[in-house]
């Protein structure tokens, strides 16, 4: 398998966990706020919201919003409200994604659509977005409202762009980057920019924060793509090859098509036109990924965006928290889950 993916036990420190531990009280406040905002007299909403909270992921987006605020020693509670907003936007998109992708599990748990059906899952995602926009209005900042409403629109455009290129194995790398920049990294960028907004920082400082988040998001997604072809279920939390099984066109497949020759290209095209793919076909992909050193190429792309992300914060270099965030951008390309 891919030699550049290393295990957590082989790393001296984990900056993500260190930052998360530092802001554990704030993250708890975010979770409590989300729980209160998702309460409803509609019984099904309560059940679905409870399930969503139970299956919550890394909370990296709210953590970025809290961290970017702390860079400037922010005193107040707006960052808690806005950190909850970005997490609600993220979870709303996941609910919709699972319906589109027909996913049955996420993070080791059954998806809401597999339990309550597609209609309920879509409506639950809409409910999350509506509650989020209420919270954004309560914040009272036109700048923040514009930022988070724009990123919600950008995420939706990314989803549609992905549908536009569905099953097109010959998609160029730039189109892939455009998709993940909209779907994933835009919310990372907005999360970081929040800290600049609520601290009334200059446009240059806000842009630096957003650049860090956006490039971190691209790095994060490329690493996710690598892990689906190189990780182990007990580490990764989902079965290896899940993207392949669902017919998702990710960077490893796009680069593999570019390097493949003759009948290999034809087979790749046919594989992703099929409704279902077999274990034998997955092993064919793995063999060719090794043959052409595709995962190594993907890692180089992730490293590039990691470096750009880290360099974006150089203007704040004397800040200890910033240094830890820069370590995070380096660490994330070697994450295992």
Image (cartoon, grey):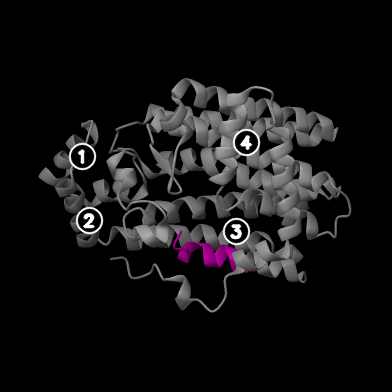
The residue where tag 2 is placed is 286
Residue at the disc numbered 1: 277
Q: Does 11 appear above or below 213?
A: below
Q: Nearer the viewer, mark 3 or mark 1?
A: 1
Residue at the spot x=73%, y=57% of the render?
67
**Is label 1 in contact with label 4 (beta carbons under 8 Å)?**
no
Q: CA distance from mark 1 to mark 2?
A: 13 Å
First in sequence: mark 3 vs mark 4: 4
Question: At x 42% / y 38%, what residue is drawn?
Answer: 175
Write down the residue under mark 3: 309
Q: How far apart are labels 3 and 4 at the CA level?
A: 23 Å
In the displayed image of the protein, which residue is found farthest to the left?
263
Q: Could you classify mark 4 by the number of other residues whose Cα lies within 10 Å: few (under 14), some (14-19), or many (20 or more)?
A: many
Residue at image mark 4 = 89
Q: CA distance from mark 1 to mark 4?
A: 32 Å
Name the N-terminal-most of marks 1 and 2: 1
Please tell me how crowded label 1 is: few (under 14), some (14-19), or many (20+) other residues with Cα within 10 Å: some
């Amino acid at each position: 398998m891919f030699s550049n993916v290393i295990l957590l036990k082989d790393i001296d420190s984990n900056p993500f966990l260190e930052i998360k531990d530092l802001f554990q009280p704030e993250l708890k406040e975010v979770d409590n706020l989300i729980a209160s905002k998702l309460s409803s007299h509609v019984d099904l909403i309560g059940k679905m919201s409870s399930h969503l909270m139970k299956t919550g992921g890394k909370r990296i987006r709210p953590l970025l919003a809290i961290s970017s605020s702390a860079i400037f020693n922010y005193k107040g509670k707006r960052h808690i409200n806005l950190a909850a907003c970005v997490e609600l936007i993220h979870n709303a998109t996941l609910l919709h994604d699972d319906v589109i992708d027909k996913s049955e599990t996420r993070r080791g748990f059954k998806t809401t659509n597999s339990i309550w059906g597609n209609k309920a899952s879509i409506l639950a995602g809409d409910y999350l977005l509506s509650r989020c926009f209420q919270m954004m209005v309560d914040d009272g900042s036109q700048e923040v409202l514009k930022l988070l409403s724009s990123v919600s629109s950008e995420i939706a455009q990314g989803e549609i762009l992905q549908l536009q290129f569905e099953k097109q194995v010959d998609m160029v790398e730039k189109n892939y980057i455009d998709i993940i920049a909209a779907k994933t990294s835009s919310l990372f960028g907005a999360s970081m920019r929040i800290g600049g907004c609520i601290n009334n920082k200059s446009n240059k400082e806000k842009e630096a924060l957003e650049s860090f988040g956006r490039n971190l998001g691209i790095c994060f997604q490329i690493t996710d793509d690598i892990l689906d072809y190189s990780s182990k279920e007990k580490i990764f939390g989902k079965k290896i090859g899940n993207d392949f099984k669902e017919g998702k066109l990710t960077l490893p497949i796009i680069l593999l098509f570019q390097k493949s020759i003759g009948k290999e290209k034809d087979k790749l095209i046919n594989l992703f036109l099929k409704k279902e793919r077999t274990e034998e076909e997955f092993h064919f992909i793995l063999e060719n990924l090794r043959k052409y050193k595709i995962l190594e190429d993907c890692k180089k792309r992730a490293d590039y965006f990691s470096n750009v992300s880290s360099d974006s914060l150089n203007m704040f270099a004397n800040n200890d928290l910033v240094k830890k965030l820069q370590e995070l951008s380096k660490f994330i390309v070697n994450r295992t889950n």
